[in-house]
Image (tube, rainbow, N blue to C red):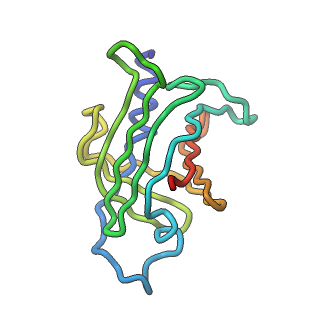
Amino acid sequence: MSRTLRVALVGALALCVPAAPAADAGTTPPLERSLVGTWRLSSFNLVDPTGAVVGRPYGSKPVGKLTYTPDRHVWVVVARRGATKEGDNALWYTGTFTVAGSTVTHRVEASSMPAAEGTDQVRRAQLAGSRLTLSAGTNPKLVLVWKRAR
């Protein structure tokens, strides 16, 4: 993976602001309640302004899991399916998250990419049934599609 793409991924994958104290179910934003649980990665693409896929950093069939907890913790791992060597074949991080409107912000506390630690990673979230799309950036835009794990 090129250094430029690696730097772009660091910026795109570090999502964070300090977590607020846990709220009760009556004051928790609807999107936040809907995110809680585990999600399986369906696709991880870089998309140009026309909507064309211009890159697949973890291949055409990446694997991964994303988990949001009710007390606002998050962890994620993404990897290239079938990778047989070390290197840029996987990424993980853990931290806390907040939700404001349709924006999810992850505060990265620990990561396989040390440059991401301590950063706030902001994602636009779209939830449709059991499908969650998280996106960031503009050209190219990072687009991750997750399906709720059962």
Residue 124, x across and y down, in percent? 55, 54
Closer-to-camera residue (81/89):
81
Closer-to-camera residue (113/49):
113
Closer-to-camera residue (19/150):
150
Q: Residue at x 59, y 50 (%)?
A: 133
Residue 115, x across and y down, in percent? 28, 33
Residue 139, x across and y down, in percent? 61, 33
- Residue placed farthest to the right in the image? 50
- Residue placed farthest to the front in the image? 150
Q: Going by the image, does 120 lie left or right of 36?
A: left
Q: Is residue 147 above or below residue 129?
A: above
Q: Going by the image, does 70 lie left or right of 140?
A: left
Q: Going by the image, does 147 lie left or right of 12?
A: right
Q: Is residue 54 above or below residue 132?
A: above
Q: Going by the image, does 18 lie left or right of 6?
A: left
Q: Quadrant of the N terminus?
A: top left
Q: Quadrant of residue 17?
A: bottom left
Q: Is residue 11 above or below residue 135?
A: above
Residue 123, x across and y down, in percent? 50, 51
Q: Quadrant of residue 26?
A: bottom left
Q: Residue at x 51, y 25 (%)?
A: 57
Closer-to-camera residue (81/114):
81
Q: Quadrant of residue 140?
A: top right
Q: Residue at x 68, y 29 (%)?
A: 53
